[in-house]
Amino acid sequence: MIKIAIPTRDNVVDDHFGHCDHYTVFTIDDEKNVINSERLDSPQGCGCKSNIASVMQEMGITIMLAGNMGMGAFNKLTMHGISVVRGCHGNIEEVLKSYLDGSIADSAESCSHHDCGDHEEKPVFIIPDMW
């Protein structure tokens, strides 16, 4: 089983990890079926300065499907054993299905400042199959 978190606002992927309304956490079995979903409220303030990475690690979350985030948050999640896939957009269930089908790629794009308006273009690479 794996746990996947998605920064969520109004049932879509929030464009910026650290400012989302909440995280939707999906538990996936070995046959890639959703067996549970739960809500994890987002802490106030910036994602890289909060304890959200350690909370997610304690919950057993190992994958984050995100719209975008700064390198501070990316590094903090990675240090807590959470693989990050950036560049996700749209309905969270559709994004999850696309990831499980193997059709989501990390954009390798990060926010260079907290206003999230400046993104560097980098090559896209495919995330290896987690199974």
Image: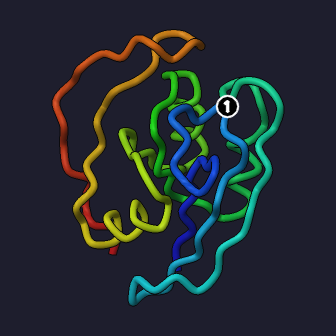
In the image, is 19 to the left or to the right of 51? Answer: left
Residue 30 image offset from top left, x and y in percent: 43, 86
Is residue 28 shown above or below 14?
Answer: below
Name the residue at the bottom extreme: 31
Identify the residue under disc 1. 19
In the image, is 122 to the left or to the right of 111? Answer: left
Residue 55 image offset from top left, x and y in percent: 76, 50
Is residue 19 shown above or below 131?
Answer: above
Picture quarter containing residue 24? bottom right
Q: Secondary structure at mark 1?
A: helix
What amino acid is found at the position of numbered circle 1 in the picture?
Answer: His
**Quadrant showing the C terminus:** bottom left
- What residue do we see at 74% from left, 62% from top? 39
In the rendered picture of this protein, how many numbered marks are placed on residues?
Answer: 1
- What residue do we see at 66% from left, 26% from top? 48
- What residue do we see at 39% from left, 46% from top? 88
Picture quarter containing residue 73? top right
In the image, is 95 to the left or to the right of 12? Answer: left
